[in-house]
Image: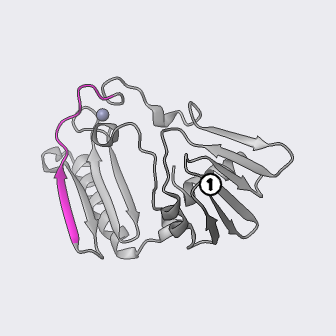
Amino acid sequence: MCCVVRASVSSYGTTSFFRPGKTPCLVCLFGAELGGNHDTCDTVGVIAPVVSIIASFQVAETIKYLTGNVEALNDALIHIDVWGNEFRSVQMGNPRMNCSCCHDRQFVSLQPNSDSLTVSMCGRRTIQVRPSGGFHLKLDEMASQLSQIGHVRHNAHLLRCDFGDTQITLFADGRALIHGVEDEAIARSLYARYIGM
Ligand SMILES: [Zn+2]
């Protein structure tokens, strides 16, 4: 079993071909706490060329794997920024022996309700989303991102973004109040789309 990670946002993208037991996993590389400020396609956009390039790497690696040419696989993490004219290829090395994911088999990301919490605020058409992990958001950076989609006001403690019939109140610890929404799944979707999860 294997997987290809692809992320294309703005003008940059990252891809690698992960093979459990053969290559490090994301937790090996970045640690278990992946929370924080994340650009998303909805907040900063994405230009088409980088999507095509990253997808091409992804498909080429998959063809190698499916045809049994594993010796040709690229075991590096590739990062490309077509606007900044950057191409980086970083060797990933071996899986970490003490990795909680690929060594201890704790798949926290597959258990979205284990620590994250979504609560409907009674009678207010408001859903509170509290993501798992140790978030510490930079609200001024989030304000800049979210100003692409709506009217934003913020201070040192919270941020408010109004767009359409929906408002998001966001706190530095990652907690958000999604106003104008009654469905918790929609609230989580909006959170992932505009803030990142
Ligand atoms: Zn790992």
Residue 126, image x and y in percent?
Answer: 77, 51
Q: Is residue 139 left or right of residue 125?
A: left
Task: Write the start and end of the magenta stretch as one range.
Answer: 86-99
The residue to which callout 1 is attached is 170
Q: Amino acid at mark 1?
A: Leu
Count residues near mark 1 (Cα–Cα under 10 Å), then give few for <14, some for 14-19, many for 20+: many
Query: Which of the pair 34/18 is nearer the observer?
Result: 34
Residue at the location (16% across, 40% down)? 93
Q: Is residue 126 left or right of residue 133?
A: right
Residue at the location (48% across, 40% down)? 134
Q: Secondary structure at mark 1?
A: strand
Q: Is residue 190 left or right of residue 28?
A: right
Query: Which of the pair 172/163 is nearer the observer?
Result: 172
Residue 44, image x and y in percent?
Answer: 47, 70
Residue at the extreme top of the image, as rendered: 104
Residue at the extreme left of the image, as rendered: 71
Residue at the extreme front of the image, as rendered: 156
Q: Is residue 67 above or below residue 24?
A: below
